[in-house]
Image: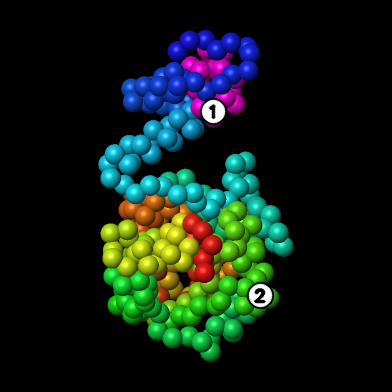
Amino acid sequence: MTQASSSPQTITPALREWIVAQAEAGHDAPSVLKAMLDSGWQEDVAIQAMETTLSDHLEAQALQQGLPPRSAVPEPDLDESPLCIDAGDREVSVLLVMAQPRIVVFGNLLSEEECEGLIAAARPRMARSRTVATQTGGEEVNPDRTSDGMFFGRGESELIQRIEARIARLVRWPVENGEGLQVLNYQPGAEYKPHYDYFDPQEPGTPTILRRGGQRVGTVVMYLNKPEKGGGTSFPDRHMEVAPQRGNAVFFSYERPHPSTGTLHGGAPVLAGEKWIATKWLREREFN
């Protein structure tokens, strides 16, 4: 790598080739960055060059391996490791952050009154939960999901509007790209076995589903009550389980509809008491 001059610096094809060569030779990011800084590259230019070059390189490798293209995903502002995030009308705590897969556990996303309000509004409309039928593009009862549920229309009440706006600001994703809020109730023994939230591109009904707003790219699961035992959100590939604490939430995103995202998850069985949750799925485009 040639030494950079003191004049305004640009990211050249030669620099990109050098960064890729270093990565393929097994050099880690800090050592590559140090070499660039020692050669006179400005730190902000060096960091940008590494991030864009390695991201593009990994994407090219993924496509060569037959993976679906990646999409932009919702992402909370975590650049400075905040303890709280301003969600507009509420300060939301950051309790856990995982980079790969992107999983963030939030505290105090909903107030007790909001949790009670969602349960009260949903209770008269509950029915056996259904899942999207990727064979047909419709819906079906799934034996892996033994809960009752219902969907609110997007923005159908002041409470729903307030929560949707808060989530949109929290994860920096447009309100209109969200599906309607779903509320689910799990009685003792009920569960949702591990699954992915994206729509499988190989299934025949997926093109029909995608017409309404593209792929799902993110999920927010909000806990509306605290079961006596069980009922956590599990990520079996990561040996991780999020406890269902009232008012808290877990967010995760998935940049491509493929198991490589590491977002296999499930609702662990409720062992005692009952569990109420609200789920918000986020799409690539406006959902209609």
Q: Amino acid at mark 1?
A: Ile
Residue 42 sits in quarter: top right
- Residue 76 in the magenta stretch? The answer is no
Q: Residue at x 56, y 81 (%)?
A: 119
x, y percentage for residue 153? 56, 76
x, y percentage for residue 50? 48, 28
Which mark is on residue 237?
A: none
Count of picture labels:
2
Q: Nearer the viewer, residue 201 or 131?
A: 201
Mark 2 vs mark 1: which is more N-terminal?
1
Any part of residue 155 in sight: yes
x, y percentage for residue 132? 37, 72
What residue is shown with label 2? 159
Q: Amino acid at mark 2?
A: Leu
From this viewpoint, which residue is outermost toward the right?
A: 89
Query: Which stretch is magenta?
Result: 32-49
What residue is shown with label 1? 47
| Looking at the image, residue 49 lies above or below residue 36 | below
Is residue 63 found left or right of 50 in the rendered image?
left
Q: Residue at x 66, y 75 (%)?
A: 159
What is the magenta segment's predominant secondary structure? helix
Q: Is disc 2 placed on a helix, strand or loop?
A: helix
